[in-house]
Structure formats: C-alpha cells, structure tokens
Amino acid sequence: MPTTYSAAATWTHPEGTPVVAAEDSRYANDAAPFALQQRRRHAIANLVSGRLYLAASVRGVRRLILSLTALSLAASAAAQERTVSITIRPSVERPSTVFEGWGTALAWFADVTGGWPEPDRARLADLFYGEGGLGWTIARYNIGGGNATGTPPYLRPGAAVPGFWRQPANTTGRDWWRADNDAMWDWSQDARQRWWLDAVRRRVRTPIFEAFSNSPPWFMTVSGRVSGAEKGTTDNLRPGYERPFADYLARVVDELQHRHRITFRTLSPVNEPNTDYWFEKNTQEGSHWSPARQATMIDATDAALKARGLSTAIAAPDETNSHLFLQDWAAYPAATRARIGQLNVHSYGTVNQTGVRDIARASGIRLWMSENDTPLDKDPQDLEGMPSALAFAEHVVLDLKRLEPAAWIFWQAVETTAPSGAGSNWGLVKTDLRSRATDRHQIYLTRKYWAMAQFSRYIKPGYRLVSVDDLDTAGAISPDGRTMVLVHVNGGLNPRALVLPRGWHTQMIVTDANHIAGCIPGTTVPQRAIATVILTRTVGTASCNGER
C-alpha cells in the first residue's frame, strides 16, 4: 500500500506499522483513520491471516466486497500455478566490488521540499536517510546554472535551480561576470536544496556527497538558456568558456563545503553530455557536450579544483547509458583519463554495461551507477502497483550484476502526483510538488519505495558484491563473511522455491501485493514479488527489522 503521511493523528497498522493517517473530509465519517484505498488494501491482506478490519461506512463495505471478490479470483488463479525450484549459487569465494552505498540526486525535489515546513521536510529526510528509512548514505547535489533574471518560467517544478552569480546593476549582455569579484557572487541562493545537505549530514554517520552540474549559467551559454542550445546536438557552452565555468563550479564546491561543514568527494562537470536531450525549449537544465569539449571541460575543472587546493576529484562522464559512455571514453586523451577519479554512468539503457565495468577494472577507477529510475513503460500511476516496482527491482539486480558498481544512485526520489490523466510511476515517494510551501503536504510511499528498501536496507556500505549464477538474483557479503544478502526478483506467476547454499541460517523479507518489506517463513518467493534473503552463520543473528 502507499503509506500516507500528513500532519494528522498517528495510528498503528494491524501489522505493527506506525502510520500517520491523512486527514480527508471525504472519509470523516469512517471508523478507521486510513483513507479508503489504504483501508481496503490492508483489509484484503489481513483476510488471509484471519484479521479482517471492516470499515464502518456502507460505502466502505461495498468497495470491500468488490475487492474481496477480486482477491478471491486472483488467489484461485494463483493456487493453480505450480511452484518451481531455483538453485542459487553465490560465488562467496570470489567477492568483487566493495559497495559504498545507495542514495539520490537532490535535483529537483529538494529545491521544492527544502522550503516546506520543518515537520514535512524532516519526515522526507527521515524516509530516505533517517533511522528506519531506506538506509541511504549518498547525496548528489545539483549546482544550478540559473536563467537570467526575468526569464518567464518554463522549467518543470523544482528544475529552476538558482545559480550563485549576482549580476551588477546597470550591466547588460553576457560578458560582465568575473569569478574573482566577490560582488558577483550570491551565497544566499539555493537555500531549499542546501537544507538537504544539512539534513543528510545530521542523519548519516559517514555521508558521501557529490556535486554535479547540468548546465552552465545562462551568460556562459550560446543560447542564453540553461535548458540547452537551439538544437539538442549542439554544444551550448560558449567557445573558450571552459575555464570560467570550471572556476564557477570549483568556487561553489569550496564555499558550500565550508558553509555546510561537508566534503564533496567528487564533482561531475557534465551530465548526459553526448545526447540529443538538451535543447532550448526543454523543461529542465541540460547541455550537450561533444566528447572533445567534455575532455576540455574535465581538464579545466581539474585545474580549477587544484588551484583552490581542494581534494575533490573529477567524476565523469555521467553519460546516459553505457553505449555512449564507451564513445566518450574512447575519445578522451590519456591525460584527461588520468584526471578522472571516479567513473559515473547512468543506466537508461543496458547495452555494453560489462564494457564499462571492464574500463573501471582496467583503469583501477571506482565506478558508480550514478543515476536511474526505471518504472515500467506506459504503466499509469498506481501508488500500490507492483508492475513498476518489479521492473525497477529487476533493473537494479541487473545493474549490480553487469556493472558491479561501488554505488547505485536513484534519480529523483520524490516525484509529483498526477493532477489528472494516467500519470506515471517515476519516483519512490509521491506528493504534490506544485502545491504552496505552506500547504499541508500529503506524502505517499509507493510500492517502489519498498522495492528500494529490499536492497538498500540490507546491502550495506562495506559489503562486497558477489556473483550469483541466477539472472534474477543479486548478492553481497559482509566484511567478516558471516552475513550474506541475496535479493531475488520473481516477476512471474509461479512461486519460486529457492534452493540455497548449506551451512547458513536464513530469513526472508518480501514486498509484493500483500507485504511491504515484511518477514515471511521459509524461502519460497511468492509470485510477482521481491525477496531479500538474509543468510547468517550464527543462529538468531539474521534480522527481520524490515517488517514495518
């Protein structure tokens, strides 16, 4: 179910989950404090265990009867599907990458939610980085370029990330900015996204911060817009502006480190550069970079960071997929490659992923899967639905297996709810990002949130990825070798009995239509489910704290 939060009363779900119930006048006469959709889902699930909570309203009863009928038909069909046996063989003797953790880019939701009242924004931060949340430890901060003052709004909610420049009065054109003139910097900007830097620092013992850029400031661009050039295949940085832009990025990194008492371990100066995504009429910041201009920008950024005495390393190329990553890398001179301290690739496309893995191995450079969100294509918004949760989980499994990355970073953890029409299943948490900051903010946890929990709560920083011979299973082992985590995605209709290695004690946590990160007995994965199996060498040490 989509767990709902707002500034209202707390109620405990029958499974033991504390939930802040949403106040909704439409359901003011109902006995249970959940909205009808949530109450129906839990009533259906509890019928299986003999604990049916009936709604008090006649309307609720009618809807429950329809739902129970549908459940009965689905259960009958499921009972006819035979269980299949899947043997899982993890290569614990050959662990690979040391995993650093999970996280999200703060663009663009942070620019909106960082301005919310403290209870609402703190609740969101807890859901991702707090105790009992997803266990994330990484945050990618977006250094905004910023359109010219007075530009009519055209970017999507949150995407108009402000820049840190200040244009002096009585100046015109685009040649007025000087990096060494303190009067041309405005450190009051981007307060909402910056709130998240402090929120993460307070919640995570050893956080990892990365800064990244989508576009230069408007006055450094060819088009005068931060959304791209007139054509998506045209470089939008003005010729010769690599060093001024690098100075801009390095100064922002330096200032924010001191002002927020954090360290940006890496800085990514370009984003999905060799694509045709970024054009002037686009609704988010972006900039095309040919491989040659990428290399020049990487060189300039490295020099700018060193000039300021910063230890921040270059992350690149943050390409949209592995196929284009290989094109970019092939064009970089050896000197440019040597200046890169971390390889970043997105996984919007999975062709040639092992080729990127091999570059990381051969060069000895750490590799991150630095951005992805994969809902099922054309799957309409469904806060409770499993189709997008399963598609997402399967994608994560395959990324871990093929890229063997040191980190896996979500794109935008919070997406806006659909005002009308089909909507989409992007994001892990849904809320209305178009609402006023002072409004009451209703927060919905989708099934994708719980799919993410199946990975990030259990594959922890310091664990090493292990190869598993089953295509639907990813694995990791603890530093002491006494705990192993296997995440298995069953997107089919047949339950799967997992045959696991001997000598381990097991517990299994499941997210499916009837469970949200809850422990179930045995090691048979239900149909259409995501299962995390925790294997330990000592009796009683496996934990089912995933049950909410």
Image (spheres, helix red, strand yellow):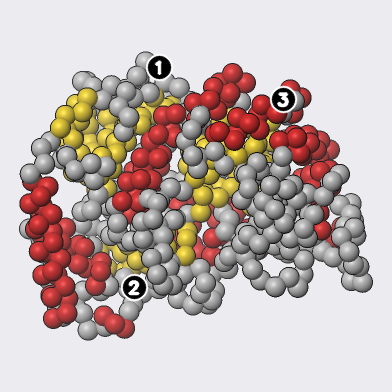
Give, as a three-letter code, the residue at label 3: Ala
Across and down, in percent, residue 120 comes to: 47, 67
Q: Which residue is mark 3?
A: 338
Query: In the rendered view of the protein, which quadrant contains the N terminus?
Result: bottom left
The percent coordinates of residue 73 (x first, y second) are 9, 57
Q: Which disc number belongs to residue 22? A: 2
SS at circle 1: loop
List the residue tagged with mark 1: 94
**In-image side of 344 versus 333 (left or right):** left
As displayed, is residue 91 above or below residue 486?
above
Residue type at mark 2?
Answer: Ala
Q: Secondary structure at mark 2?
A: loop
In primary-sequence order, the first of circles 1 and 2 is: 2
Disc 1/disc 2 C-alpha distance (Å):
49 Å
Q: Are marks 1 and 2 in contact (CB under 8 Å)?
A: no
User: Counting residues from the N terminus, which is met first, the one under dot 1 or under dot 3?
Assistant: 1
Task: Give the left or right position of residue 124, taking residue 265 as reference.
Answer: left
